[in-house]
Amino acid sequence: MRHPISFFLGFLFFILGSIGILLPLLPTTPFYLASVGCFMKSSPSFASRIMKNPTFGPMISDYQHHRCVRPHIKKKAILVLWLSLLMSVIIAPLILVKISLVFIGLGCTFMIQKLNENPQTFTSK
């Protein structure tokens, strides 16, 4: 292990990303991207294992190599975001929390929409 701090952070980001699968408001893919970045410095075999994951590997690879996200992935991300936010707004007891969640959702939607989706980079897949 060449970089123990990078290994620890990679492991921490991986755990947070895995928790994000169950908790919709915790972002999964960004934590997995950070995890792969840390593991590339400390444990390339761990990075390789994450990249070979059939669910997250292609998304991470697309972003790392092309800085792009496939259009259907963006649509799914926005759908899951708003479904989870809707559930949270229904459950939240305070109106200020409900309003804050809507603004957070709008901000996240804007950021997701800004991600590049150049279709020419996906023609080989």
Image: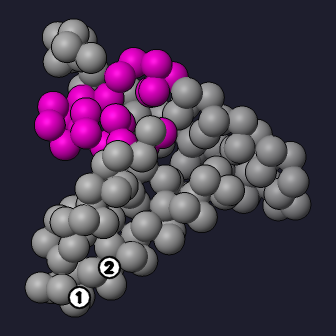
Q: Does the residue at mark 2 contact the one at mark 1 (Cβ under 8 Å)?
A: yes
Q: Count residues near mark 2 (Cα–Cα under 10 Å), then give few for <14, some for 14-19, many for 20+.
A: some
Tell me the residue at 51%/22% (across/down).
75
Q: Which residues are magenta?
A: 55-75
Tell me the residue at 36%/55% (across/down).
50
**Looking at the figure, which quarter contains the C terminus?**
top left
**Looking at the figure, which quarter contains the N terminus?**
bottom left
Q: Quadrant of residue 92?
A: bottom right
Q: Main secondary structure of the magenta part?
A: helix
Compared across the picture, whether 25 is left or right of 120 comes to right
The answer to which of 70 and 82 lies nearer the viewer is 70
Residue 32 image point, x, y percent: 38, 57
Residue 42 image point, x, y percent: 18, 77
Where 117 sits versus 18, above or below? above
Could you say which disc has been placed on residue 70 in the image?
none
Count of numbered circles in the view: 2
Which residue type does callout 2 highlight? Answer: Leu
Taking the magenta stretch, the answer to whether it contains residue 65 is: yes
Tell me the residue at 35%/36% (across/down).
59
Q: CA distance from mark 2 to mark 1?
A: 6 Å
Tell me the residue at 30%/66% (across/down).
46
Is residue 38 visible from the viewing direction of this image? no
Residue matched to label 2: 9
Q: Quadrant of residue 38?
A: bottom left
SS category of the residue bearing label 1: helix
The answer to which of 85 and 29 lies nearer the viewer is 29
Residue 54 image point, x, y percent: 44, 39
Which residue type does callout 1 highlight? Answer: Ile
Q: Quadrant of residue 69?
A: top left
Compared across the picture, whether 118 is left or right of 26 comes to left
Residue matched to label 1: 5
